[in-house]
Amino acid sequence: MNNTRKIKEIIGGVIKEKNFEYIRCEKKIIYDFKRQVDDVEQHVYVQQHNIVDQEYKIMLYTTAKGHGMKEIGTILPEYEAKEYWRADSDEDFVSVMEFFAKFLKDYGLEELDKMLVEKPDSFETPERKAWFKEHREELFEKYESKYHVMDEAKTYDRLMKIDEILYENREADEDEESEKQVQEIWLGMAAILTEIVLQIPTATILYDTYHIEIHIPAKYRDWIIRPVDIVVQGWLRYHFDEFPSKNFVKVSVFRFVTDFLKN
């Protein structure tokens, strides 16, 4: 059986009404359908686990910010722990593709339409970004006087100290007061990280982008550092024990600033 033809027939037949077109099969395992709606690009991917294992999943992707990649398990709770569906025979393969097609009809097409609209970040809301802009210097002074990050002589050590502070404060109770305290630590560390990066003379900060961004002009392109997002993501990884070492902020930032900050 020609798997590509069958995927185009079963999956393509469902999403054709939403103007998706089959584009290609990448690396012999990722079957790509695409549509363009104004300035938003969307993809429906059918992916084989690898070139040998006959297991498949379906993914929905959009360039509209705030959504990320969606799979069956992120939309339907009963499949949260399941990523791939096995197909050991041609009959199994058709059955899996028909299951994916039903998922698209019942849930996926509606979800893709929702994914055309940018979704505000749950933490970096317009209001919080405006507040950070207004109070960034106060936050820096408050948390620098408490933790003395800038007393470290080297940029590398300053970034590592931010990681240490986030790691030490990784525990949080599920009550409103604890959440508020943690979020202020995020903003305080982000203010210190911003201060470190803005020591680069050509660096500029933008508050009205999707995430707060610091742009550093380089020879071929601007480096972009998102200080609040990096701090939040680092804390979350430490909180859920999802990062192998205590250097998420350093890893995310140092390679971009090392050519500019020699210390």
Image (tube, grey):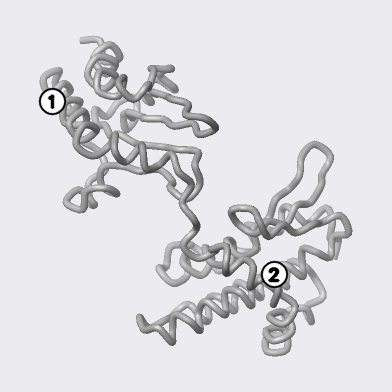
Q: Is residue 99 left or right of residue 179?
A: left
Mark carried by residue 9: none
> Which residue occupies the foreground of this view, 55 or 140?
140
**Label 1: element kind:** helix
Q: Quadrant of residue 130?
A: bottom right
Q: Which residue is mark 2?
A: 133
Amino acid found under the numbered disc labelled 1: Ser
Where does residue 143 sit, x and y in percent of width and height? 67, 84
Q: Quadrant of residue 43?
A: top left
Where does residue 62 sit, x and y in percent of width and height? 45, 38
Q: Is residue 103 left or right of residue 170?
A: left
Whole-number angstrom distance, CA of label 2 to CA of label 1: 53 Å
Where does residue 21 sit, x and y in percent of width and height? 39, 18
Mark carried by residue 95: 1
**Label 2: element kind:** helix
Q: Are marks 2 and 1 in contact (CB under 8 Å)?
A: no
Amino acid found under the numbered disc labelled 2: Lys
> Which residue occupies the foreground of this view, 60 or 255?
60
In the rendered image of this protein, does residue 202 appear above or below residue 247? above
Q: Which residue is pictured at 52% across the width and 63% down the height?
A: 233
- Earlier in the chain: of badge 2 and badge 1, it is 1
Q: Quadrant of the N terminus?
A: top left
Q: Quadrant of the C terminus?
A: bottom right
Mark 2 Cα-neighbour bin, 10 Å: few <14, some 14–19, many ≥20: some
Q: Quadrant of residue 240?
A: bottom left
> Which residue occupies the foreground of this view, 49 or 126?
126
In the rendered image of this protein, does residue 18 appear above or below residue 237? above
Mark 1 Cα-neighbour bin, 10 Å: few <14, some 14–19, many ≥20: few
